[in-house]
Image (cartoon, rainbow, N blue to C red):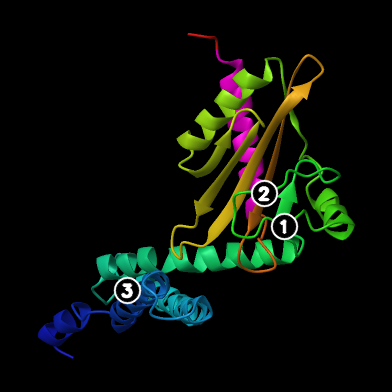
Amino acid sequence: MNDESISMSREALSKPAVAGLIVGVAAFTAIVASGVGYRLGWWHFTVGLQVSEWATYGAAVALALSVVGLVQTRLGAARRGLVVALLGLLVALPPVVMAVQWEYATRTTPAINDISTDTTDAPVFWDMPNPTDYPGAKTAALQRAAYRDLAPLKLAMPPEQAFAQALAVAKEKGWTIVASVPAEGRLEATVSSLLYGFTDEVIVRVKASDGGAQVDVRSRSRLGRIDRGVNAKRIRAYLASLHERALEPRR
């Protein structure tokens, strides 16, 4: 092989790198389209989830191809396309990571979708399409086993002030306020997921307790039978923000 042939060989573009980028972009686009199509009413959410599942498989293939491309295009290697391989990796990695997290959450969280800081006397939704009661003892037992840290928040302030703080935190988090009834200490709101716009319902109850206020939160998903820990995570984050806000000096 002469010098010219060797030079051309070294400048050849890595096919796995190119394929990884193309497949990765296609997979990412399909995942976005699955959610957009559901939001626009083009298909049922189950169809969107199936599209997203297969697209995730595609992203895994793209990730593998991009890794091969990185090996082929590393410094001193006989192929061009390092940037292409890196782009393919960046596009394919997020869907694969999200899928792994999704599967891990499915396996490690209980098959429930209604979480409350008070499982004995849970707050009741009154302004939602289906104002049902908390599911009951079985759900409560599963919740307590999985989320032992969830409990009402006690605040050293009058209930009226605590309610105002609770409402402010809900607005800061971007929740859509459905009902705000200070006289009852009841706040109801909805939260939508980013991609599919799935709606979760949240109720905050503020009542007098031991010279101060007690705040209970209940969060549930409208669709599906499991929430993969999303509702518990939301309650934790909300109560942490409310507690932090309550500790701030008055202005």
Give the Cα distance between marks 3 and 1.
43 Å
Mark 3 surroundings: few (<14), some (14-19) or many (≥20) residues within 10 A? many
Residue drawn at the location 80% of the way across and 41% of the way down: 118
Chain-order first, disc 3 or disc 2: 3
- For the N terminus, the image quarter is bottom left
Residue identified by numbered label 1: 132
Q: Which type of secondary structure does the marked residue at label 2 adopt?
A: loop
Give the Cα distance between marks 1 and 2.
7 Å
Residue drawn at the location 47% of the way across and 36% of the way down: 171
Residue 72 seen from this side: no
Q: Are marks 3 and 1 in contact (CB under 8 Å)?
A: no
Instruction: Please tell me whether residue 235 is drawn above or below residue 21 in the rendered image.
Output: above
x and y percentages locating residue 57 in the rendered image = 49, 80
| Image side of residue 41 versus residue 245, left or right | left
x and y percentages locating residue 103 in the rendered image = 64, 68
Label annotation for residue 184: none
Q: Where does the magenta region start and end?
A: 230-248
Instruction: Please tell me whether residue 51 is drawn above or below residue 151 in the rendered image.
Output: below
Residue identified by numbered label 3: 25
Label annotation for residue 125: 2
